[in-house]
Amino acid sequence: MRENDMLDDGYIGINEAANYLGIKAITLRGWIKKKEIELPAHKIGKLWKFKRSELDAWVQSGKSAIRTEERNEHE
């Protein structure tokens, strides 16, 4: 891992994480509340924090696609 990559992989807040994923912050908050979603979120004090590398791995694993599939089933 390059030095810049390590610096870029610090914790980001919920708004930045939602923007990174291309969703609204309220959607991300809803996913956090649903315990069955294996979202890589870390609660630090009262704040939820995320690492870009963990979000990338979560998306690449296909676990994020489950939300889309479930939403489509209910429409």
Image: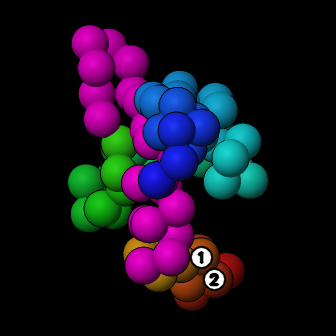
Q: Is residue 25 magenta?
A: no
- Number of the label disc, if any, that sits on residue 72: 2
Determine whether the residue tagged by mark 1 lies in a helix, strand or loop.
helix
What residue is shown at x 42% (from left), y 79% (from top)?
Answer: 61
What span is in magenta? 42-61
Few, some or many residues within 10 Å of mark 1 (<14, 14–19, 20+)? few
Report the residue marked by disc 1: 68
**Image-quadrant location for residue 45:** top left
| Residue 35 in picture, x, y percent from top left | 25, 54
Residue farthest along the top direction in this orientation: 45
Q: Quadrant of the C terminus?
A: bottom right
Which amino acid type is marked by label 2? Answer: Asn
What residue is shown at x 47% (from left), y 81% (from top)?
Answer: 62
Mark 1–mark 2 contact, CB under 8 Å?
yes
Classify residue 45 as left or right of residue 50. left
Q: Is residue 54 magenta?
A: yes
